Image (cartoon, helix red, strand yellow):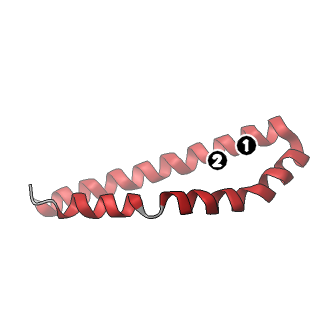
Amino acid sequence: MKKSKFIKSTIILIIGGMITKLTSMVIKIVMTRLVGVEGMGIYMLISPTFMLLIGLAQFGFPIAISKLVSENKK
């Protein structure tokens, strides 16, 4: 029973990750067509700094929440 639940949860996470990657790809294609080469250059220049700030803002909360939920005995 536990193994079945683990496999279902893993499949759900894999599907969610794939949907996220596909959505991201579509957004980048559309954005490139809208803003052009120069706009994408500026976006790529700013993107790493923005991702760093987002990572610092999250500060590991999703991982901590996942750990708390997985340890819940109920």
Label 2, on which residue? Answer: 25
Q: How dense is the environment of label 2, judged by Cα within 10 Å: few (below 14), some, or many (20 and up)? A: few
Give the quadrant of residue 27.
top right
Mark sitting on residue 29: 1
Q: Amino acid at mark 1?
A: Ile
State how far apart marks 2 and 1 are (Cα). Answer: 6 Å
Q: Is residue 15 above or below residue 4?
A: above
Q: Is residue 47 left or right of residue 37?
A: left
Percent coordinates x, y for residue 64 in the rendering: 34, 63
Kindly state the secondary structure of the residue where label 1 is placed.
helix
Quadrant of the image for the C terminus? Answer: bottom left
Q: Position of residue 53 (x, y in %)?
A: 62, 59
Quadrant holding the N terminus: bottom left
Residue drawn 25% across and 53% down?
Answer: 8
Q: Position of residue 61 (x, y in %)?
A: 40, 59
Residue type, numbered disc 2: Met
Q: Residue at 67%, 56% (x, y): give it.
A: 50
User: Where 49 falls versus 22 (above or below)?
Assistant: below
Please report the residue visible at 24 percent of the width from the left and 61 percent of the height from the top.
68
Q: Are marks 2 and 1 in contact (CB under 8 Å)?
A: yes
Q: Residue 65 is drawn in which quadrant?
A: bottom left
Q: Residue furthest right?
A: 38
Which residue reaches farthest top? 34
Residue displayed at 57% across by 46% down: 22
